[in-house]
Image (cartoon, grey):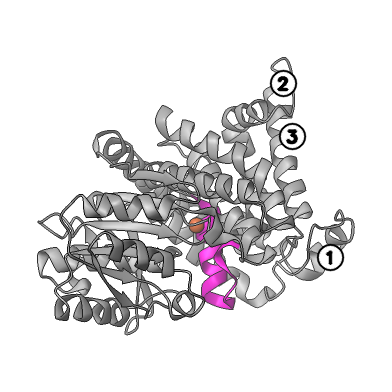
């Protein structure tokens, strides 16, 4: 396709995207999303067991990973449930990017043991799989048949969450991502009723996370909040959640990375992750996620790390269209004063994101990115964004490829050399 034809197609696609954004904006305004009851602190697990017991529940399926069980991280919850007269049944088959086979295995155990509730105990994978199990069990439908919007007629089984990382915000979101082994595609199950009834945010569960995992997951949360904030369907409510999350992350993420046992920082990050989740589940994400998903698919780049690398580049690209939002964020973080020009304030906020990356030791380049993959990555990312994301500034193939070229290791090595001394290495 020649350049003129390509830009004509892009213009037509953009018109299609504008119609989608209008529909999303309408849905965001009318779709009720429940806030889970939030239990925060070192006694959160105990309080969660008390809350579960109030619903006359007798058997709870704990959806988790083998590693969590081995490390004894779920022991306190198991003990507290038993004290409340609830029988815990452990399903420890959760793996990263859970497949329908994993969800079905959990469902088999749930049915076999006649569990009447589910507690997701883990990161985004455990929570996403548990949400789909809860809808499938209540509606007696195969998980594969739940892909799409609101495919279950009945309310999901009572569902609770105990996140063990601070990043995905899955305890607040209405979407679950399940991988299809046959098509090698990620499928979305979207249902606002799948938000857990309550979530326990216990900072002690995050104490042992490595600095690199803490940084990557924390930057995922920051990306959720910022992309939601600059989204064209954001509302006053989502802006409030996003702004609070952003403020907390800039203050506490470096502390949590430096000292994993800083429980105040861990607690603040778990709240930030929840708030960012609450913001993006309604206002959506954007190009950062679209590109990061492609980097994950091509090279296995961890989601949070990919987001962190791409985030400042997309903000720079979006600056002209999102300067008002970015300037507001600069003022919220006291990076300047209200008399400064909007563009200068927006610039300060983008610089602040770059500085945070450097402080956390996050590289400016994607080590595995190869020139020959760039066109395909750009195509995949733009397609995902066009179909899903209400971004402030539309990006074309040429612009996306140029942005990706800036992330090539050789191109970015000079920038990386001037990085500040990181708080740790190896993100
Ligand atoms: Fe994310």
Q: Earlier in the sequence, mark 3 or mark 1?
A: 3
Secondary structure beneath label 3: helix
Q: Residues within 10 Å of mark 2 (few under 14, many from 20)?
A: few
- Can you name the residue that lies furthest to the bottom here? 182
Residue, x 48% and y 45% (percent of image)?
276
Which numbered disc covers residue 348?
3
Relative placement, left or right, of 164 versus 118 is right
Residue 312 percent across, percent down from the top left: 67, 49
For mark 2, what is the residue?
341
Q: Earlier in the sequence, mark 2 or mark 1?
A: 2
**Dominant secondary-structure state across the stretch colored magenta:** helix
* Residue segment shown in magenta: 286-304
Occupied quadrant, residue 412: bottom right
Residue, x 47% and y 49% (percent of image)?
285
Secondary structure beneath label 1: helix
- Nearest the camera: 272 or 403? 272
Relative placement, left or right, of 234 versus 152 is right
Whether pointer 3 and pointer 1 mark residues with C-beta atoms closer than 8 Å, the reply is: no
Residue 56 percent across, percent down from the top left: 15, 55
Residue, x 65% and y 58% (percent of image)?
215
Which numbered disc covers residue 413?
1
């Amino acid at each position: 396709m020649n350049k003129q034809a390509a830009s004509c197609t892009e213009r037509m696609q953009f018109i299609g995207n504008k119609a989608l954004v209008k529909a999303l904006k309408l849905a965001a305004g009318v779709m009720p999303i429940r806030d889970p009851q939030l239990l925060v602190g070192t006694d959160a697990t105990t309080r969660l067991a008390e809350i579960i017991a109030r619903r006359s529940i007798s058997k709870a399926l704990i959806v988790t990973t083998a590693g969590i069980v081995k490390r004894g991280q779920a022991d306190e919850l198991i003990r507290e449930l038993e004290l409340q007269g609830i029988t815990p049944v452990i399903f420890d088959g959760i793996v990263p990017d859970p497949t329908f086979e994993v969800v079905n295995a959990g469902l088999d155990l749930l049915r076999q043991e006649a569990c009447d509730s589910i507690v997701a105990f883990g990161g985004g994978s455990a929570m996403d799989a548990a949400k789909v199990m809860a809808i499938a069990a209540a509606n007696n439908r195969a998980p594969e048949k739940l892909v799409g919007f609101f495919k279950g007629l009945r309310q999901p089984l009572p569902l609770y969450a105990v996140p063990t990382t601070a990043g995905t915000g899955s305890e607040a979101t209405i979407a679950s991502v399940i991988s299809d082994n046959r098509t090698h595609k990620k499928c979305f199950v979207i249902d606002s009723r799948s938000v857990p009834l309550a979530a326990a945010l216990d900072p002690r569960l995050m104490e042992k996370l490595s600095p690199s995992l803490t940084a990557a997951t924390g930057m995922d949360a920051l990306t959720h909040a910022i992309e939601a904030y600059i989204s064209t369907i954001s509302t006053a409510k989502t802006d409030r959640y996003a702004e609070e999350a952003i403020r907390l992350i800039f203050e506490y993420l470096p502390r949590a990375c430096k000292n994993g046992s800083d429980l105040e920082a861990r607690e603040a990050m778990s709240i930030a992750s929840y708030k960012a989740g609450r913001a993006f589940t309604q206002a959506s994400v954007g190009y950062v996620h679209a590109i990061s998903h492609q980097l994950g698919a091509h090279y296995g780049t961890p989601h949070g790390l990919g987001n962190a690398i791409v985030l400042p580049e997309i903000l720079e690209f979006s600056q002209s269209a999102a300067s008002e939002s970015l300037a507001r964020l600069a003022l919220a973080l006291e990076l300047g004063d209200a008399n400064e020009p909007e563009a200068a304030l927006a610039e300060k906020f983008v610089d602040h994101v770059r500085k945070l990356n450097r402080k956390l030791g996050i590289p400016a380049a994607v080590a595995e990115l190869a020139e020959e993959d760039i066109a395909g990555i750009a195509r995949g990312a733009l397609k995902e964004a066009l179909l899903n994301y209400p971004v402030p500034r539309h990006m074309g193939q040429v612009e996306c490829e140029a942005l990706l070229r800036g992330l090539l290791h050789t191109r970015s090595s000079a920038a990386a050399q001037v990085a500040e001394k990181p708080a740790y290495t190896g993100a």
